[in-house]
Amino acid sequence: MRRIGVRLAGGAVALAAPRARARPVIRTWVAEGIARDAEQRRLFPWLAVAFGVGILVHFVAADGPPLLAAPLIGAALALALIPALRARPAALALALGVAAAFLGFAAATWRVSQVAAPILTRTTIGPLVGMVEALDEREVGARLVIRVESFAGLAPEVRPVRVRVSFRKTPIPRPGDVVAATARLLPPPEAARPGGYDFARDAYFQGIGAVGSLVGAVAVRPPSEPSPLRLRLAATLDEARNGLTRRIAEAAGGQAGAVAAALVTGKRGLIGPATNDALRAAGIYHVVSISGLHMVLAAGVVFWLVRAALALVPYCALLWPIKKIAAGFAMLGVTAYCAFSGWDIAAERSLIMTLIMLGAILVDRPALSMRNLALAALIALAREPEGLLGPSFQMSFGAVAGLIACARLIDGRLFVRPGAGRIGRLVGTGLSAVAGTLATTLVAQIATAPFATYHFQTVQPFGLVGNALTLPLVSLVVMPSAVIGILAYPFALDRPIWWLMGQAVGGMLAVSHWIAGFERAIVVVPAFGTAALILLTLGLLLATLPASRLRWLAVPPLLFGLVLAARPDRYDLYVDRQGGGAAVRGPDGRLAALGSPSGFVLEQWLKADGDGRQPGALIVRSGSGRCDRLGCTARLPDGRAVALVRDRRAFPEDCARAAILITGLTAPPTCTGPLVIDRRVLAARGAVALRADGEGFTARYTRADGRAVPWQPRSVHGPGPPQPIIAASEGAHAPEDGAATPPEADAPGGDLVPGDAPTEPLQ
């Protein structure tokens, strides 16, 4: 025994020796990398990362409204340690990171408290009076944002401040009008599936407390009292945007005119579904969404025009800092463009980034740097911390970080050789432009792929081709025409310019439709979890932020993230949040529908399952299920029965034979045999996803942890029938069948598209 012990001890010493020798090497390698990053000013961006971590902790873990003083005190204590840690760089960096995280938590706390407003808790029909703040014309009717003065007799403490409604008749009221109509309003819908897009959260931060539709005639009334100046200015600007949208669409004509108008004013309602699908298939929908590409091109056009005009005057060219003057005019121009295009979240973040880069020119600093990107991220997150959770912020800053990190690899002067002749320089410049465009697009697509796949479950394999063929048109014709057209608009000399812009946009659409005709132009992939997204995001940060060999630290999280993403959780049953519909995996391994879930919900379930079928294909097939007036039944692949109950008379039979019972009603207490998902469960937990696990089931819920979040208020009405409330007042009536747009179709389905999260390949 003693000899064995000696041998084991000797082996342990032998194994420990290489480890002991490796530790100084690793420590030296890390120290050298950090030192180089400090020289390159690459440590500052990690403060933006820490700020974002604080925001993420608030939204993921906070249960109820935290005290604002708590994170501020934590940040102050961390900052107070800085003088004592100046001789210890690692500890100093840690203290700064902790302070930034506390400040991020505080920013999220402050933002949530500032946008707090009442949210409708159940479907309500009644008279609505309010001022039209904004209007988005569509192919049929319009979508309005109304600031509510009164609705269905609700008290101010429970009445939504702003609502978004659709109106499918004419004439359409204008922004600034005070309207009175009967409205059918619903609470902003939550996620259609666990881990899916939560429209209710986005609506909360936009101040929208209900969505729905206007029913019947709309009367325009004089305002009972003058509106605030800010609202009147916003309504006037929105009306001007609508007028210019119509002018551009008429001058350019067809869908090319609709897309051209969207590029200038940000109004995308006139773009048809077929055009939207073609742009997405070609991977260029980001061109339609006002974002970084437009801001950079608009600023670049103004910068070039002003600098070229000043350079023509010898006195100005010799004595004035024309580059800085041009940068100043570009800052004014791009700010005006952002304001006129609607000043939405994506455009605002892109404006901040563009202004910082132009400001760097004014102070003789490099315009495109990781430090400037981090500063833009800090400002954007401080203003709108909730943006961190959305695809727009993630994809925008991910793309730019990738482009900055790979700037040397995509240098446009690659093919321009010193000493070449005129023809050689011309050919080299052309090849460099093509190679630069392809490399830029490829880098941006790789950097944004984790976020695009996580949020949209789609991949566009031919996006590189689409961007390479269309971005030259956008850069050389479309955006210069947009800037010149806006300058000519006050003189009524803009119609020929819009026509020319429409011709270029028409070429872009022709390329898009051509690519959309390719087989598998859009590939749907199964949804993966947040763990994979976190690992992939960490890998992207480690691959782009360091300037040293520390980039190799990105390899492990990227590999593990890809492994997790390749093994997504697929569920055998989805149940919508009202209990009126479900999707069951059939014997063929594909989902089939039960009941009547909305088209948007079906689309979300299909994408999460990696199924590229259209929602209309998700029907109960012969042999896999059946429906009648009382409800529907189907079977899981293992033969267990699933029942969806519509009428109480079906409870006795279905409770006795089903393994899972789904209903929007309240199940009787005697129904104890199956797994029951009824009105009480759905009201408390939201949408449900189940996976068969042996003889039992593994369940996930939209509100899995039961935390109290402000955009998911509990009903103040208590238990009662699921029918909508109809206000007892003159003219109030229930809408006819089909008159009201389902909340899913009128809310997230119309807004959250890949174009709302632009890849911004040229930013």
Image (tube, grey):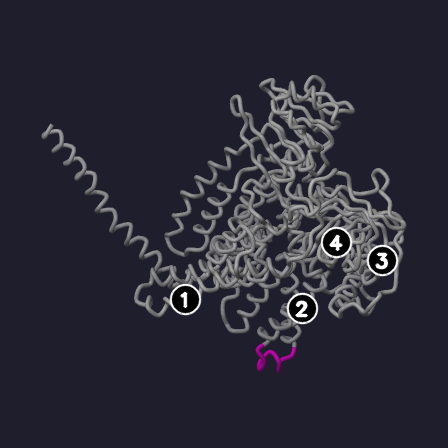
Q: Which residue is mark 4?
A: 163
- Region of the chain picked out in magenta, as a range: 313-321
Kindly tell me whether residue 461 is visible in this rendering: no
Kind of residue indicated by mark 4 = Val
**Main SS category, magenta section:** helix
Kind of residue indicated by mark 3 = Val
Q: Determine the CA span between mark 3 and mark 1.
A: 53 Å
Between 91 and 119, the residue placed more toward the observer is 119
Queried whether the magenta region covers residue 206, the answer comes back as no
Query: Upstream in the sequence, badge 3 or badge 4?
Result: 4
Please tell me the numbered disc located at residue 667: none
Q: Quadrant of residue 74?
A: bottom left
Q: Residue at x 53, y 57 (%)?
A: 66
Q: Residue at x 67, y 58 (%)?
A: 344
Between 26 and 310, the residue placed more toward the observer is 26
Q: Quadrant of residue 76?
A: bottom left
Q: Which residue is mark 2?
A: 333
Please tell me the numbered disc located at residue 179: 3
Q: Determine the CA span between mark 2 and mark 3.
A: 35 Å
Give the secondary structure at mark 3: strand
Q: Residue furthest left?
A: 2
Can you say whether 653 is above or below 290 in the image?
above
Give the secondary structure at mark 1: helix
Q: Are marks 4 and 1 in contact (CB under 8 Å)?
A: no
Can you say whether 636 is above or below 301 in the image?
above
Q: Which residue is mark 1?
A: 79
Query: Upstream in the sequence, badge 2 or badge 1?
Result: 1
